[in-house]
Amino acid sequence: MSNATVIKIEKLTKRYSGHTAVDDLTFTAESGKVTGFLGQNGAGKSTTLKALLGLMEPTSGAATISSKRYLELPNPAKVIGVLIEENAFHPTRTGRSHLRILARAAGLPTSRVDEVLRIVELEKAADRKVKGYSLGMKQRLSLAAALLGDPKILVLDEPANGLDPQGMHWLRDLLKDYAKSGRTVLISSHVLSEIAQIADEIVMIHKGELVKQTSLKKLLREAKGATRISSSDARKLAKLLIANHLTLRNQSSDEIVVASEDVNKVLAVAAKNNIEISEMASENNLEDIFINLTDNHKGSKN
Amino acid sequence: MMKRLISAEFLKLWLTPTTWWIVGTSLLLPLIIMALIPVKDVNTGKDVVSLLGWAGASGYITLVLGAIGATAEYRHRTIVPTLLIAPHRLKVLTAQVVTYLLVSLGIALMSILIVTALVAMRTGFHGISTDLLVNSYLGNAVYIVLSTLLGLGLGTFIKNQAATIAAIFVLFMAVGHIMPVLNADLAKYTLDSIGTSLSGGGVSLPKEKGAPTVKILSATNAGLVYLVYAVVPLAVGAARLQKNDIA
């Protein structure tokens, strides 16, 4: 199956009174894939998504869905399902009422409300007032709203917030199945371990700028082979390794990061100079990669 | 599209318990007033019009209905799912305005019916002319509907619920008292005087003996002035809604 570009963010910039939330950001999300949109809190993820969804006007650049601006979609609910606010409910309405109102506005049959309540496993609580819902239940209700129009695209901002481990598992399966059926999923999160289990493609941003867009497999492959070595004499060890023509990927006062293939040389240098190694860890998780990439990105900017 | 949005706005009202409390109160208020006020010296058609004017008291409550309806979307952030389903913001606002006007018209009709029934039971109509009766009914209905629109307009403009309710109090209490002090001719443009003009006297509390007589606008002019009161904040609110980001 070929993967078509469905969501396109092109040179997007958003400035508020002197502050640049998103800066010349460009990335895409393709059909048949789960694209993880990663960034720390305040990195500009929600601002980017709000620009994509017509809730914010970008200062410059464009954000399109199948080459159309959100405003140009004839009935958006049937094209794109969105979860962007985890608590956008009237507290005295029931979960079912919330969905009925949205279904009515989108011209969808009431029977679809029951279907999505079943999908998100919220049927039993559907007739309770939303103010009595747990955070996880509210998140499921938001997901139900996103699924109402049976859309071909899902855009979810931090969808796992408040979900218990079972809920997380359920969400992963749901989104993977969604992408497998040829649909498009763009999911933003600052919880990198969660994205690592679900995404095919990764878009990393930092302070509103693109750090990297690549496939998760490629990213992990590129980073594999890095080893984090902790020592109380890390600075001395770093100097000796540089003198021995070894390249350091990163260093601080108590640890260094080197290519795994250099570990034996590092151990030899440490032993020769009586430098104690307190811990060694293979670095190939998304969190470390993210920190390294954003650190490098910051470095390249300075 | 517009039909769908109006239908959804009706559903929002129907499925929100607060609506029922407000509608109930708006009907109860003229009923209680009519049940409690003394009805001595009701001898002419004009006296009857003055009593029928208490139907307009529902307007105070529908003013709050409009204000709460407009601001609840922001208070509970439901504006976000609303605009995700229907991204054309002015269409959403238009649907809301149409819905609230229709609902307030329904409240006006019920309120007028209640007051009419109580007048029939307590005093009778004393040969009131059809013209006077129709004008009274129209004036009260217009007052209630435009009060709702004013609440909706202020809510759309201010967005914050508590601040909107405070603004209503300021408009009625402070501005209503300051305007006549600044210039006696302005007295007829206060919301209180406009209410009197439209309802035929009911919504204003009786003046003390010896108090200066305030000239009031004709019902038509009062309706037009009240329309301006309601439309200005609504238009400014609409412009803000269209232009501003939903942060």
Image (cartoon, coloured by chain):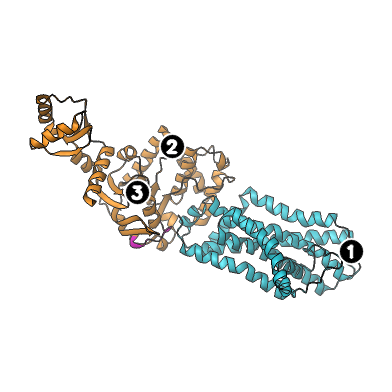
Protein chain holding label 2: A
Protein chain holding label 3: A
Nearer-N-terminus badge (2/3):
3
- A58 in the magenta segment: yes
Q: Nearer the viewer, mark 2 or mark 3?
A: 3
Name the image quarter holding residue B183.
Answer: bottom right
Is A131 above or below relative to A59? above
Q: Are marks 3 and 1 on the same chain?
A: no
Q: Which residue is mark 1?
A: B124
Tell me which residue sits at (21%, 33%) in the image.
Answer: A255
- Magenta residues span A53-62
Dot 3 crowding, Cα within 10 Å, few <14, some 14–19, many 20+:
many
Describe residue A9's horizontal placement relative to residue A16 as left or right: left
Q: Which residue is mark 3?
A: A43
Q: Position of residue A53 (x, y in %)?
A: 40, 56
Name the image quarter holding residue B41.
Answer: bottom right
Q: Nearer the viewer, mark 3 or mark 1?
A: 3
From this viewpoint, is residue A236 visible?
yes
Q: Which mark is residue A163?
A: 2
Is A255 above or below relative to B169? above
From this viewpoint, is residue B112 visible?
no
Dot 3: what SS? loop
Dot 2: what SS? loop
Dot 2 crowding, Cα within 10 Å, few <14, some 14–19, many 20+:
some
- A34 in the magenta segment: no
The residue lying furthest to the left in this view is: A244
Is B74 above or below relative to B186? above
Colour in which the image shows chain B: cyan
